[in-house]
Image: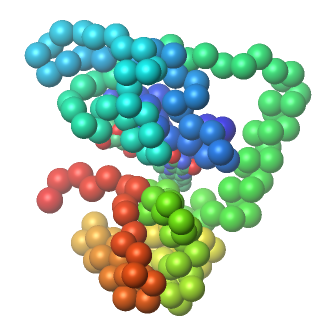
């Protein structure tokens, strides 16, 4: 499930990262983290408030320093085959050959964000160096010289157009750091 998701265990837990119908919440047993007051706390899965791309670490400060994961035992050849299939699927469907922050918007409760962006005719729409990927409308890619401003302006534009056309407010999956 995690094959092809770039990042660290800490980031994946905070984001409850996932793909292909599975997410971190299914394999995290407990997490040890450093609290703001300098103390170290360990909490079990049930207290980590996991939901779609969310965990308790999004509601409060805390640096994850250790995690216990519970994995299923399986045949190494089958695991390898699954990983190869995930890789193949990503290469086919996602713009992994261009810089991006991954999927820009969260999946909606009753709609697929990328589909609405595509149907709004926004594939390939470009602001500066930021472009709605031609391969997968859910990704905003850097065509070479995108600034953070280009990307944020494009995100705002996509949200506005999709809202005007379909009345749905796209929610960002990526996190904006800084101003
Ligand atoms: C090409 C591509 C494909 C992607 N595909 C997927 C996908 O299929 N599914 C998916 O869920 N995501 C996907 N992502 C997004 C991203 O890879 C995941 O969210 C990943 O889990 C982020 O991990 P990171 O370590 O890079 O965290 P960062 O992006 O660096 O950080 C994410 C957040 O976690 C915090 N954080 C980082 N480390 C810690 C820590 N130790 N303790 C507490 N907080 C911490 C950061 O402050 C930040 O707020 C994709 C991204 C790219 C570029």
Quadrant holding the C terminus = bottom left
Q: Nearer the viewer, residue 151 or 115?
A: 115
Q: Quadrant of residue 154?
A: bottom left
- The residue shown at (36%, 72%) is 169
Residue 89: x %, y % from top left: 74, 56
Q: Is residue 124 visible?
A: no
Q: Is residue 58 visible?
A: yes
Q: Is residue 156 above or below residue 80?
A: below
Q: Is residue 169 above or below residue 92?
A: below
Q: Quadrant of residue 131?
A: bottom left
Q: How many marks?
A: 0
Q: Nearer the viewer, residue 110 or 163?
A: 110
- The residue shown at (50%, 79%) is 117
- The residue shown at (41%, 75%) is 168
Relative to residue 59, is residue 17 drawn left or right? right
Residue 140: x %, y % from top left: 46, 70
Residue lying furthest left: 37
Q: Quadrant of residue 31?
A: top left
Quadrant holding the N terminus = top right
Relative to residue 25, is residue 95 drawn left or right? right
Relative to residue 146, is residue 94 drawn left or right? right
Residue 111: x %, y % from top left: 54, 69
Relative to residue 158, is residue 59 drawn left or right? left
Residue 34: x %, y % from top left: 24, 17
């Amino acid at each position: 499930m995690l094959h092809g998701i770039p990042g660290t265990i800490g980031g994946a837990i905070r984001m409850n990262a996932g793909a292909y119908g599975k997410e971190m919440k299914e394999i995290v047993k407990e997490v040890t983290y450093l609290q703001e007051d300098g103390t170290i706390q360990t909490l079990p899965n049930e207290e980590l408030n996991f939901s779609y791309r969310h965990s308790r670490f999004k509601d409060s400060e805390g640096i994850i320093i250790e995690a216990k994961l519970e994995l299923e035992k399986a045949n190494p050849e089958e695991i390898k085959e699954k990983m190869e299939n995930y890789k193949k699927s990503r290469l086919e469907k996602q713009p992994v050959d261009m810089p991006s922050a991954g999927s820009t918007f969260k999946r909606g409760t009753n709609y697929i964000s990328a589909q609405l962006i595509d149907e709004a005719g926004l594939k390939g729409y470009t602001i500066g160096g930021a472009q709605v990927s031609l391969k997968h409308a859910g990704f905003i890619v850097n065509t070479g010289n995108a600034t953070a401003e280009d990307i944020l302006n494009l995100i705002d534009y996509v949200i506005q157009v999709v809202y005007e056309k379909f009345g749905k407010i796209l929610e960002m999956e990526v996190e904006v750091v800084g101003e």
